[in-house]
Amino acid sequence: MTLTEILPTLRSSLPPHLDAGVWPRTTRWSERGDLRAGGVSLAALAAEHGTPTYVVDEADVRERCRAYAAAFGAGDVAYTGKALLSIDVARWVAAEGLGLYAGSAGEVRVAALAGFAMDRVVLYGSAKSTEDLDTAYAAGVGTIVVESLGEIARIAATAPAGQRVLLRVLAGPADCADRRFGLHIADGEAAAAVARIAAQPGLRLAGFDCSVGHQLNRFSLYEQELGRLCSFAAANGIVPERLNLGGGHAVAYRPAELDLALGAFAARMRAVLHLEAGRHGLPAPRLTVSPGRAVVARAGVTVYRVLAVTETRTGGRLVAVDGGMSDCPATALCGSRHSALLIGRAGADLAPAVVVGRHNDADDVVVPDASLPADVHPGDLLAVAGTGAYHHARATNFHLVTRPALLAVADGRSRVLVRRESLDDLLARDLGR
Ligand SMILES: Cc1ncc(COP(=O)(O)O)c(C=O)c1O
């Protein structure tokens, strides 16, 4: 029997367990049930900045960058900015020595405004606009990823002489026809691209790029991809300078879930690359990675205010908050399962709850299976973990709601990285007024 079973009052006076693998590294309970991240009270942030609000723990992001740098070498890691990007986030990444994968003119501009060494920036994207390319050239982006046959002549005609390119390939049989991002090896498309690039004296093929999947914690798909890339290079007489294995590294959103084991992964990938390169008579290329989610997901927390609590006909409990699928699209889009906690006061014993949003949409669910105090009520604050990646980045104005602010916390201080959108911001674009 546990102490809390002998003394039930003790159970309700203890804050719920805070899983260090799920919440930002600096998160701590403080007095009266408040949660602090980066030494800052989340309830105080909600009072000062309103809700919903994204909070990102700078130390957590920087530590993840350092872990990647330690595992692969900082020069061989580029953060994929689509997961979360602001000028300050780009500055943290640059300061930790990582490069940046930028997928649009906007992301390139942010990198330039952050003072990124542009040689460390890679422009990728399966359908690059003229604006994307022109912005990248003007900023001096170091590398461009070629992702279709059609864009080779276009890039060759417009890029600065000697432009470094990577070729994004779809290597495996599993990369069947519905995979959009890259050139298929199996049907000769990738080989045709190699020949076309070679025929362009202004382009320099530095190697290959790929994306194996998402939320992966097993190594096998990456290992197979390395074998296929080496075999393709050898078959086409190419000695690649580098191979980018993409991202897709798993992060834990719930206490029982597993992250990709980074140190073991890096060691294993290096070993496999040496083996595969040797087997195909190639010198081992540089191995690079471009993680997005794994760098920022766990650094982020979203703070919401509860607007309504209702009982369903089947005895369930719906806790409606002042955000939803407009700021937390991952639950509806990808079935993400976040962890949620009541903050700002001590609560009663935990009971099941569905945290839903404010939008009139059946898919508007923030956490489908939360455990929240039985006495949760309107006005309470909820913190939802693991919202650093693909939340701020994918936020929308669904229902013409305004997008939340993005705040950073570090060393007991908070800072607004991106201010909350106002209704005036929104309506300024509507020329019907
Ligand atoms: C080449 C490459 N690297 C990295 C990523 C980011 O993936 P994640 O955020 O899962 O790490 C992608 C995503 O599609 C990608 O295409």
Image (cartoon, rainbow, N blue to C red):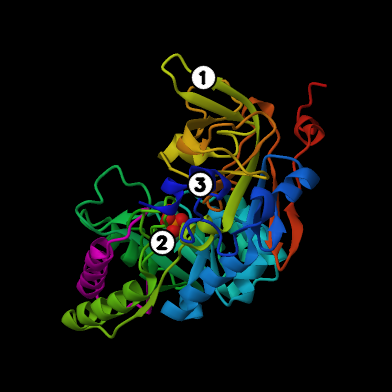
Residue under label 2, please give it: 247
Look at 42% across and 57% down and name the residue there: 251
Q: CA distance from mark 2 to mark 1?
A: 41 Å
Task: Say whether residue 346 is magenta.
Answer: no
- Residue 362 location, x and y as percent? 48, 22
Q: Nearer the viewer, residue 9 or 219?
A: 9
Q: Nearer the viewer, residue 56 or 305?
A: 305
Magenta segment boundaries in residue numbering:
214-243
Residue under label 1, please give it: 311
Is 431 placed above or below 94 here?
Answer: above
Judged by depth in the image, the label closer to the viewer, 2 or 1, is 1
Looking at the rendered image, the quarter that the C terminus falls into is top right
Classed neighbour count for the residue bearing mark 1: other residues with Cα under 10 Å, few (<14), some (14–19), many (≥20): few
Is 209 on the left-hand or right-hand side of 409? Answer: left
Q: Secondary structure at mark 3?
A: helix
Tell me: is circle 2 under 8 Å from ligand 1: yes
Judged by depth in the image, the label closer to the viewer, 2 or 3, is 3
Look at 52% across and 25% down and name the residue there: 318
- Residue 214 location, x and y as percent? 37, 53
Q: Earlier in the sequence, mark 2 or mark 3?
A: 3
Residue under label 3, please give it: 11
Q: CA distance from mark 2 to mark 3?
A: 41 Å
